[in-house]
Amino acid sequence: MSFTFSLLPSVLLTYIGQAAYLRKHTDMRVTDIPNVFFNSIPTLITSVIGSQAMISCAFATMSHLQALNCFPRVKILRTSRRYSGQLYIPEVNIFLCIAACVVTISFRTTGFIAKAHEICVVLVMVITTLLMTIVMLLVWKVNIWWIAIFFIVYISTESIYTAAVLYKFAHGPYVPVAMSAVLMLIMIVWHYVHVKRYKYELEHIVSRDEVKDLLERRDLKRVPGLGLFYTELVQGIPPIFPHLIEKIPTIHSVIVFITVKRLPIPYVDVSERFLFRQVEPKEFMVFCCVARYGYRDKLEMANDFVKVLVEYLQYYVRDLNLYGVGDEPLKIIFHSARVDSFTWERKPSGHVIYAEEMLTPAQSFSELTMHPVSMSSRLAHFQVGEMNLEEMLKIEEDQKIIQREVDNGVVYIIEESEVVAKPHSNLLKKIIVNYIYSFLRKNSRNGEKMLSIPRGKLLKVGITYEI
């Protein structure tokens, strides 16, 4: 529809306008004919159209790179409430401005841009044909003879076009190709190291027994306050935690491991934002939390974020004690709306309660009543008053402890990890990890800026990963 009702009429009007301009100016010199388009239509309008297409493409590409963890962090502003593809990236805009100025000062002509555009268009056609052939073969599973006919017809035609424009490569088109090569290098290096680092953390997740041993150490001191420990891991305790305790055997009275996830939906309701689980042993008040945000949701400032987090943490503590009492085993599964799962099990087997049913007091109780068979015994406990005063006081005491530690102060703990290649790695890997990736990471947006954490309450814990 866009092509038929927008692009095609615009192109036809453009050519009709050029023809009318030539008929009116029959005395035009032959050398002026190639510029008839720019003479018939103001050059400024043409530049605006071309630049807008390039800027939109750059923004969309960068957004996909961020989602795939193939590029350093940049600030992405969503400009539409309905469409996720409408966005603005200040860093990319500044880079395009600088690049445009450098190219203009260096070449002082648009001729090489036209030649570069020709090569880019032809190469896009070739790449599209190759990818379409792969899709037809592996996804659609089309008959091999139809695939062969499609490939021969299109690739032969496009190869002729490609051969016809490649001679212009040395006259300017090497500039965008060189820029693309630099961007590809950044993407490959960043993604390679990011995947290696994430796998390293997954392989060194702290087990339940190790966490219990750490928390029960005699030399471990608990200081007043709430410690928010930011991590990228959705499941398990990151290896930075035992590293911190081994170096400084001190942790806060209440610890919450926070993982912030962006979902491919515009908004996430506050009542569905936080998914919690408690780390054993319970008396140490250590929790794991996944905070889910839509692409249009703004991450609150640190103080506001803590207020909402603590409110729903207290709901979780209350619901966990209410629906976890009794002798019947209970299994609670916390899962993300995307791919990541978030699992915790009190006792083997039993009824499954999803995290969305455990988020607010009203929802928790009303939703659980929809499972009469497995929950009837608990509801019976509540109705006959078998939930004694001691259990109620325990819930109230836990909530008071959390609020008291929040009043004592909140500290935001961020992992400051350094990734280096192992000593026996080859020279290429050392250059990629120790120099290129290190340079990119030091000059990219830091985590505390993305999370709006005040510097006065920030604690960075350094650790080195050898990959």
Image: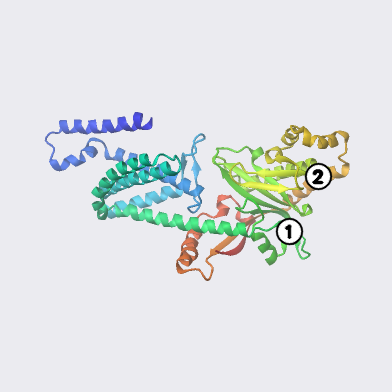
Q: CA distance from mark 1 to mark 2?
A: 26 Å
Mark 1 secondary-structure assignment: helix
Q: Residue 122: x percent and y percent?
A: 30, 45
Q: Quadrant of residue 295?
A: top right
- 330 is higher (above) or lower (below) than 73: above
Check residue 274 in the rendering and tell me which mark sits there, or answer none: none
Please name the residue shown 72% across and 60% down the image: 210
Looking at the rendered structure, the kind of residue marked 1 is Asp
Q: Residue 187: x percent and y percent?
A: 45, 54
Please identify, in this view, whether the residue under mark 1 or under mark 2 is nearer the observer.
1
Q: Quadrant of residue 396?
A: top right
Q: Name the residue carrying label 2.
A: 395
Nearer-the-camera pick, 275 or 370? 370
Q: Quadrant of the N terminus?
A: top left
- 354 is higher (above) or lower (below) than 285: above
Q: Name the residue carrying label 1.
A: 209
Residue lying at the far bottom of the rendered structure: 424
Q: Residues within 10 Å of mark 2 (few under 14, many from 20)?
A: some
Please name the residue shown 53% across and 65% down the image: 420
Q: Residue 348: x percent and y percent?
A: 76, 47
Q: Quadrant of the C terminus?
A: bottom right
Mark 2 secondary-structure assignment: helix
Q: Residues within 10 Å of mark 1 (few under 14, many from 20)?
A: few
Q: Earlier in the sequence, mark 1 or mark 2?
A: 1
Query: Would residue 226 be visible to someone looking at this image?
Result: yes
Q: Is residue 344 left or right of residue 177?
A: right
Q: Is residue 116 left or right of residue 427?
A: left
Q: Residue 207: x percent and y percent?
A: 69, 57
Query: Would residue 50 be visible to someone looking at this image?
Result: no
